[in-house]
Amino acid sequence: MQAKRSAAAAGLIGTRVLVAKPGLDGHDRGAKVIARLLRDEGCEVIYTGIRQRPAMIARAAIDENVAAIGLSVLSGAHLSLTRAVMEALAAEGGDDIKVVVGGTIPDADIPRLRELGVAAVFGVGSSLDDISCWFRQNFA
Amino acid sequence: MSSTTRRSTEAGKTWLSETGFPIERVYSGPYGDDRLLGQPGQFPFTRHIYAAGYRDRPWAPSLYSGFGTPEDANKRFRYLLAQGNGRANVATDLPTQIGLDSDEPEAAGEVGRVGVAIDSLADFETMFEGVPLDRTPVSFNVNAVAPIFLAMLVATARRQGVELTQITGTMANDILHEYVARGTWRYPPQASLQLMAHVVEYATAEMPRFYPFNIRSILLHESGAHPGQEIGLTFAIACRYIDEVLARGLTIDEFAPRMSFFFGMGLHFLEEAAKFRAARRLWATLIRERYQTETPASLKLRITSVAPCGSHFTAADPELNLVRGTLGVLAGALGGVQAMLGTTIDEAFEIPTERTQELALRTQQIVALESDVCATVDPLGGSYFIESLTDAIEASAREEMERVGDSAGVVEAIAAGRPQADLAARAYELEKALNSGERPKVAQNVYVPEGGKPSLRLHEPEPGLSEQRAQALAELRTRRDANAVATSLQRVRDDASAGANLMPSLIEAVEAYTTLGELSRVLDGVFGHYRQPVEQ
């Protein structure tokens, strides 16, 4: 198990990820857990802190040259905030950055987020393995 | 059938409590000192703060609700009160909690989502229409805007013809926890502590039945704290509040009897019951030792709890959360709390519907009325295991209190991010234990159902709410007396600059229908804005 994990970690070493909390929601337990998980997987993680505007998130992602953005929203505002981030990314030429969304997401909103161009959605109950697996498949 | 040797499920497993204490196979006496236990209603209140416990004062179900417009919230409050909810426990949306009007750009997408949108006194009047403030306790989970909310409550009571002395309920007024978790801060800590003290001073003088504090260790539990961490950091914060208020000239017995606390809890209901017992004993001991008072009302820890915290509810097979809710109610009841919120089965997806709130309320009513949990005070008292856990949690809480710098050092510890880092580290460990299956979660990592899960009917947010609220604000601004608004805002600015208690000028200002956002921006000009330190 240990060997498997470090082998996998080698695959993600140097992958740059921005973990961000858009909007006004301050529930940051999940975002911090994901930041730690991805660091353990070898990623270089930048965590923005709470209350970030979508345009600032897009700007930071481009400036930091990240491969992926993890958005965490638990306030129910995930659709409008994600749309704003996607639009800002497109406007700034960051459409190659993969965006994943986590938080309290009703099932019915998953296809809506996918339509906005979100690469993956991890709602409540997603396991750490599911998430690291997805990152390995996409970036390792 | 061939006989096989039964495999022990005990061997090789480490039995640990939530706090991390090793759990013995069986506990035997003696368990310590009877004097530490005392009798219900007597120092150190380990067993209960009232002699007759729930026989005389059952806990109050206090479901937390609010969404959309003040009309929506009013309808839900009245429905829940009619079903036996003990108070109107107001959930406000995020813009409201941080002092933004519904039409400010930062509020986009968040208006009316996690709670009701409040912009002015007009919204308070609507929200409490048909909710008489002399008979209905009201609670507000607001912190950065607590003084403005208290002003709106006072003004609404006046309009209802209710004396301020008759108002009951709670104001969270607990800003330091917001810098640790949840994050609805606005001003820097020192200014926020002043505003906290204004609320306490005013309520102490004018509203003797109101609790101007509902200090929320629940935020720590939800961020990953174990019981000792939850109590320790919260009591350090609470003692800091006491020290700030004492410095303004109040005496401990004037306001300590009006402090209340809001604890989190998990599903380990025996340990959680012990946690409440340990917290009561530690609080009584601390207040007596530190502030030299023997007044029983000052020494009693009044507990609101949630049953249980939302982070323990699953998205997988969500109807099972009803059972988790029952364990939560048992923890609160066995721990002797005074009020309980209820988490609803749809917690992992959305804010609750009327139906899911009704289920959470009925869970409390069934435990209270159809079981024997209220028949005797502190039914677990004297259990070797419970008393051992109570002692151990109390000791752990004392250690944590010291670790975070106690009342003198806690603001600095929070500013440096030290408790936040402790909690984030534990949250990650808990998540890894869920991932490995070391912490079982039925339907999520063990007994995972095949195929689709039953779906719930979820709350559906009203479309166009932001526009509707912006329109209402625009109308309010044309309707109100612009001179009265300008004059009252100036008075708030002057009082804030002079360091005077802001409550009188805030009440005058809200009565002139100045908005929450306007008042908050005036205070920004005096106090500045908090900037969250960049975390690594």
Image (cartoon, rainbow, N blue to C red):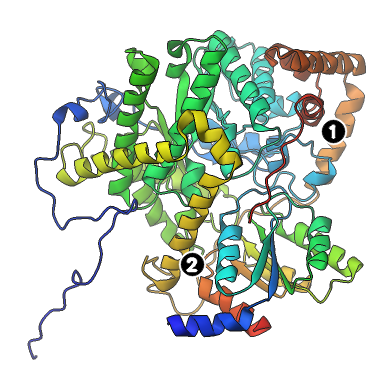
Residue A18 lies in what quarter of the image? Answer: bottom right
Q: Amino acid at mark 1?
A: Leu
SS under mark 2 = loop
Residue B162 lies in what quarter of the image? Answer: top right
In depth, the one of B59 and A129 nearer the eye is A129
Q: Position of residue B25 (x, y in %)?
A: 15, 58
- When the figure is inspected, residue A12 is found, relative to residue B81, above or below; the finding is below
In depth, the one of B81 and A37 nearer the eye is A37
Residue B525 in sight in this render: yes
Residue B395 marker = none
Would residue B418 appear left or right of B484 to someone viewing this image? left
Which residue lies at the image location 82% right of the left edge and 65% below the top edge?
Answer: A63
Q: Amino acid at mark 2?
A: Ala
Question: Label 2 belongs to which residue?
Answer: B316
Q: Position of residue B130 (x, y in %)?
A: 62, 25
Q: Tell me which label, 1 or 2, sits earlier in the chain.
A: 2
> If the image is split into quadrants, where does the C terminus of chain B sit?
bottom right
Which residue lies at the image location 68% right of the left edge and 19% below the top edge?
Answer: B151
SS under mark 1 = helix
What subunit carries mark 1? B
Residue B169 in sight in this render: no
CB contact under 8 Å: marks 1 and 2: no
- When the figure is inspected, residue A118 is found, relative to residue B164, above or below; the finding is below
Would residue B39 appear left or right of B488 to someone viewing this image? left
Question: Label 1 belongs to which residue?
Answer: B473
What subunit carries mark 2? B
- When the figure is inspected, residue B391 is found, relative to residue B319, above or below; the finding is above
Using a 10 Å C-alpha cutoff, classify the residue at mark 1 as few (fewer than 14 neighbours), some (14 to 19) or many (20 or more): some
Q: Position of residue B178 (x, y in %)?
A: 60, 39
